[in-house]
Image: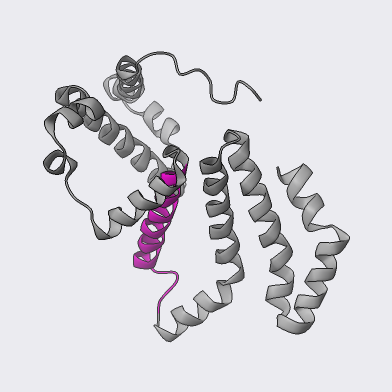
């Protein structure tokens, strides 16, 4: 995507002419950034279609492309806002805010990835913010059994997802702080090493035991 679409498209004569015009009329940052922004939107729309030739994948790709493009092109605006609000962009609090903000933005995109009916995806997204409720209380027992199956299995799924997410989060934080997780585990005694190796392995095996049927490989047709 980068080598055969992004750079060839961003460096076309038309994009370069657009860049020069924007530089002269709208400013240096806008002129320098706009070709890359348009190329990013194009790339992510194609990434969406690569997942499958369906509208919801196209919207998912378009959403991510627009998020990246707008974040790049509005960077000077964000910097001015931070300056006026006296935000310390190097503080730990701001760093944590950025992580949470990115997490929320990315998860909004998953509505369009997982919900195949685009109008329903928008409806569910809207209800998440203005009409969110506990589905266990709002839906009938039969409907919940249809969606979740056995409630004990659903609880097991939640426990498994939570443990897996915590492990990934801890490892990510350690790596971000330049800590070699595998190297540190190797230095521990045999009991700690075995826990470090086999707990993730057991979680993976358990996750496979919850899967039903054979969905096939999503990218097999490519």
Magenta segment: 87-112
Q: Quadrant of the C terminus?
A: top right
Q: Is residue 215 left or right of residue 160?
A: right
Residue sticking out furthest to the right: 13
State which quarter of the image contains the N terminus: top right
Above or below — where is 219 with respect to 120?
above
Could you say which quadrant of the image residue 98 lies in?
Answer: bottom left
Q: Position of residue 153 (x, y in %)?
A: 20, 22
| Residue 82 visible, this orientation | yes
Which residue is depicted at the point 16% across and 45% down? Answer: 134
Quadrant of the rendered structure where residue 213 is? top left
Q: Residue 202 location in percent, x, y? A: 31, 18
The one nearer the camera, 116 or 104, is 116
Q: Residue at x 28, y 25 (%)?
A: 192
One can see residue 177 in this view: no
Query: Which secondary structure type mostly characterizes the magenta part of the structure?
Result: helix
């Amino acid at each position: 995507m980068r080598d055969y679409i992004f750079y060839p498209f961003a460096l076309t004569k038309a994009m370069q002419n657009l860049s020069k015009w924007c530089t002269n009329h709208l400013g240096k940052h806008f002129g320098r950034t706009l070709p890359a922004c348009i190329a990013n939107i194009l790339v992510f729309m194609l990434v969406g279609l690569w997942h499958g030739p369906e509208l919801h994948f196209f919207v998912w790709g378009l959403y991510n492309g627009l998020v990246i493009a707008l974040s790049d092109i509005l960077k000077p605006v964000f910097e001015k806002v931070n300056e006026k609000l006296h935000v310390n962009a190097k503080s730990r609090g701001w760093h944590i805010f950025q992580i949470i903000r990115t997490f929320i933005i990315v998860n909004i995109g998953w509505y369009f990835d997982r919900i195949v009916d685009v109008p329903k995806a928008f409806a569910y997204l809207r209800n998440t913010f203005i009409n969110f409720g506990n589905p266990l209380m709002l839906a009938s027992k039969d409907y919940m059994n249809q969606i979740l199956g056995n409630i004990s299995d659903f609880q097991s799924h939640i426990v498994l997802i939570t443990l897996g997410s915590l492990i990934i989060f801890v490892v990510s934080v350690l790596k971000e702080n330049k800590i070699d997780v595998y190297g540190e585990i190797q230095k521990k005694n045999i009991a700690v090493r075995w826990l470090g190796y086999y707990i993730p392995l057991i979680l993976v095996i358990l996750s496979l035991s919850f899967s039903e049927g054979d969905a096939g490989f999503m990218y097999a047709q490519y």
